[in-house]
Amino acid sequence: MKNCKCADCGLLATYTGSSEFISVPPMTRNSGENASGCAGLYCAARVIDFKEEVLAIDSPAILAIDSPAIPDKQKRKTVLHKDRQCHRFIQHQIGMTLRDHLELIRMIELEQMRTEQRARDLEWQAEQRRTDQAFQIKQKRWDRVVQISTTVINVILTAAIGILLVKLGLKEK
């Protein structure tokens, strides 16, 4: 997980009202001001709920009971610039749209999955090689046992047949 701030993330989005999420303008990222025609802040990665965090700033645990309410702009700025750990963070690139950032993070995640799969495949192949080598060693030992046993049996049978032939008088000593 990366140490980051939502204000620097390419997945920070706002709703335009025309059923479209867009990347948050730099002014809003820095100041916390709502861009005109935009309704709220959203995490396109769905890691945090900005509305919930902004509302939590007014909770009695954070503010003294008699203290004045914090302006929404300041609350948004506080939430946007809060240090956090996020596994989906991707640095905002000026000129890239929200969709571009989403595609980039998907490509990064896909490449990471490929790398992890390749590592698993290599580990499996190494295990298969170890298993095959162990089998081959056992097979060579067994082949050697069979070879020696066959040689011993051949020597014994040859000797027994020789002795039998001598006894029967079919062969001279």
Image: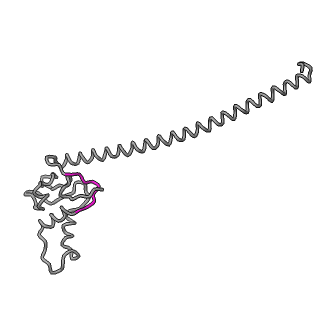
* On screen, residue 87 above or below 100: below
Is 142 within the magenta? no
What residue is rendered at 54% in x and 38% in y? Answer: 132
Q: Main secondary structure of the magenta part?
A: loop
Q: Residue furthest front?
A: 173
Viewed as shown, does residue 8 lie left or right of 171? left
Dividing the picture into quarters, in which one does residue 87 lie? bottom left
Quarter occupied by the N terminus: bottom left
- Find the magenta span and give its range: 83-91
Closer to the camera in the image, 52 or 153: 153
Dividing the picture into quarters, in which one does residue 27 lie? bottom left
Q: Residue furthest left?
A: 36
Is 90 within the magenta? yes
What residue is rendered at 92% in x and 24% in y? Answer: 167
Viewed as shown, does residue 166 lie left or right of 56? right
Dividing the picture into quarters, in which one does residue 37 lie? bottom left
Tell me which colouring the rendered structure shows. one colour
What residue is rendered at 51% in x and 39% in y? Answer: 129
Quarter occupied by the C terminus: top right
What residue is rendered at 17% in x and 65% in y? Answer: 78
Q: In the rendering, at what x and y percent does residue 60 appear?
A: 21, 77
Q: In the rendering, at what x and y percent does residue 125 appear?
A: 47, 40
